[in-house]
Each structure stands twice: as C-alpha cells, then as structure tokens.
Amino acid sequence: HGVAWEQLHDLEEALPRADVIYMTRVQKERFPSVESYRRVSGSYRLGSEHMKLLGENAIVMHPLPRVDEIDTLVDSDPRAAYFRQARNGVYIRMALLDLLLGPRLLTA
C-alpha cells in the first residue's frame, strides 16, 4: 500500500520517532532453550525512563496480559492505551457476536 516503514533494533532510537508502540511479551516457548530466552528476556522492557523519550501524542498498546515487559509505573501515563484497548476489545467482540448471531437470536 505504499506505506514507508523502517526496522530499528534500538528502542531508544525508535521511541522519539514512533506514533504507536505495540509491546508483547518475549515468548519463552518460542526459544530453543531456556538459556537463549534468558539472554534476551530483560532486553525488551518498557519503563518510565523510556516514556520520557516517547512523543506527547504517541500511545503504548499491549494485548495483555503482560508479564514484566511494561513497568507498572507506566500504567498511570495517559499514553498507556492498553487498558482502554482491552476495554474496547470487549465492545468489539459484543458487536461482532450481535452482528453474527443477532438475527438468529431474534427469530429463535
């Protein structure tokens, strides 16, 4: 679709340029060994010091539940959108169920 993108490997470099940060946990089950998981697990953690680098209108999203990839101190930042994201997900699922099952429920 012609959308420009860039892959960065340094979080501190990416944060000031980002509009949206979508965090997920480091998935232990996808690593070949516990040792390889331990080497990277602490590298992907968003803390309040990172939020200072993030733009004023940017947001942080996460599918929840989180493990330890976002410090709980970030929760009070208005740019932390993951609780709103989860709440809105409930309404979306309700609307989808109504759309898919609503007519059948009314005629049953």
Image (spheres, rainbow, N blue to C red):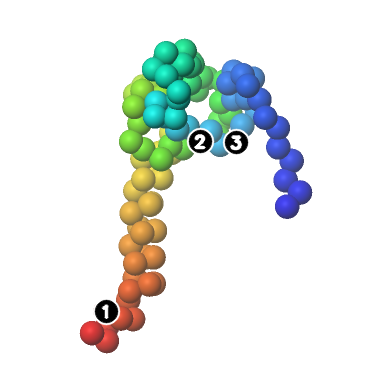
Look at the picture and state if 91 lies above or below 4: below
User: Which residue is situated farthest in the bottom direction here?
Assistant: 107
Quarter of image, res 94: bottom left
Residue on which the image places disc 3: 19
Residue on which the image places disc 2: 22
Amino acid bearing label 3:
Asp
Look at the picture and state if 104 lies above or below 58: below
Left or right, 14 with reference to 76: right
Check whether the beta carbons of the residues at disc 1 and disc 2 lie within 8 A of each other: no
Indicate the quadrant containing the C terminus: top left, top right, bottom left or bottom right.
bottom left
The crowd level at tag 3 (other Cα within 10 Å; few <14, some 14-19, many 20+) is: some
Seen at 56% across and 26% down, the residue is: 54
Amino acid bearing label 2:
Tyr
Residue on which the image places disc 1: 105
Which comes before the other along the chain, label 3 or label 1?
3
Quarter of image, res 93: bottom left
Q: CA distance from mark 2 to mark 3?
A: 10 Å
SS for tag 3? loop
- Residue 72 on image: x %, y %: 34, 24
Amino acid bearing label 1:
Leu
The crowd level at tag 1 (other Cα within 10 Å; few <14, some 14-19, many 20+) is: few
- Residue 9 on image: x %, y %: 63, 21
SS for tag 1? helix
The residue lying toward the viewer, choosing from 57 and 30, is 30
User: Which residue is situated farthest in the left direction here?
Assistant: 108
- Residue 55 on image: x %, y %: 58, 29
